[in-house]
Image (tube, rainbow, N blue to C red):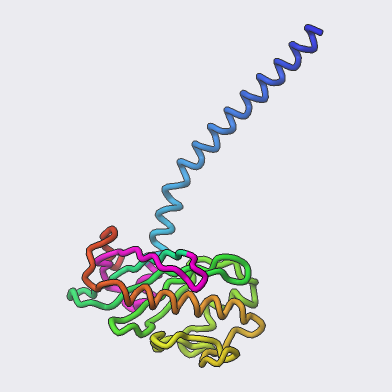
Amino acid sequence: MKKLESSLLNMTLVLTGVAVIMGGILAYVNNLTSGPINEQKEKALADGIKTVMACNDLTVANTDTVKQNDAKGKELTYIIYQTKDAQGNDLGAAVQSTTGGFGGDLKVLVGFDKEGTILGYTLLEHQETPGLGAKADKWFQKGEKGDIIGKNPQEPLTVSKDGGQVDAITASTITSRAFLLAVNNAYNAYKVTPADGESGATKQMKEE
């Protein structure tokens, strides 16, 4: 019995040791990769803001966070990046908005001018079906079938199937509705944010 107990003790000690070592290795690797990953995300966001604002030489003068409840009472968070051009003139803002798509969260960055007209958009994250809902990254761009560039969501944008003026992605009405909801919500969050607001963390972004 003592020999059996000794074997079990040894096995327990070995397994514990292996777990500790592996945990240390994973923590070390995570520490090494977290910096580059965060830098990559920041660069992607910076490039995205320039894209949706249709301006390469801009500054993010202020960053605001807005919380609003949706129609179901769920609290949603929006990040508003107030921008200025090289001369210090207000360009409008890029707004980060998230809704639930067909496959999961659909995170959109939308650029608005000072009047709330859509300048551009890009998808930051999505889990939509390749070849169907994933087409949202191009479908609603300038000159495409569902073109929303130049529109003002003061009157909410909806798909033609729901009586609106925007053509839905073929066989992906759910994704199209989710995308337009994200755009409409982004507009509503932008309109309640003062252009010269001082809340949030200020971040400078210039052309690289």
User: Would residue 140 appear left or right of 13 to someone viewing this image?
Assistant: left
Instruction: Residue 13 in the image: state x and y as whole percent.
Output: 66, 19
Outermost front residue: 73
Q: How many labels does the image show?
A: 0
Outermost left residue: 87
User: Would residue 27 appear left or right of 154 to someone viewing this image?
Assistant: right
- Please state which of residues 76 and 138 is positioned toward the viewer in this rendering: 76
Q: Which portion, as a residue range, is magenta?
A: 47-74
Q: Is residue 128 magenta?
A: no
Is residue 195 shown above or below 74?
below
Q: Quadrant of the N terminus?
A: top right
- Identify the residue at image location x=63%, y=68%: 103
Query: Which image quarter: residue 120?
Result: bottom left
Q: Is residue 50 magenta?
A: yes
- Please state which of residues 128 and 157 is positioned toward the viewer in this rendering: 157
Q: Quadrant of the C terminus?
A: bottom left
Query: Which image quarter: residue 100?
Result: bottom right
- Identify the residue at image location x=59%, y=76%: 175
Instruction: Residue 168 in the image: state x and y as whole percent.
Output: 58, 86
User: Would residue 96 appear left or right of 24 to someone viewing this image?
Assistant: left
Instruction: Residue 54 in the image: state x and y as whole percent.
Output: 35, 79
Is residue 64 shown above or below 181?
above
- Identify the residue at image location x=34%, y=74%: 190
Outermost right residue: 1
Instruction: Residue 82 in the image: state x and y as whole percent.
Output: 28, 70
Is residue 75 shown above or below 132?
above
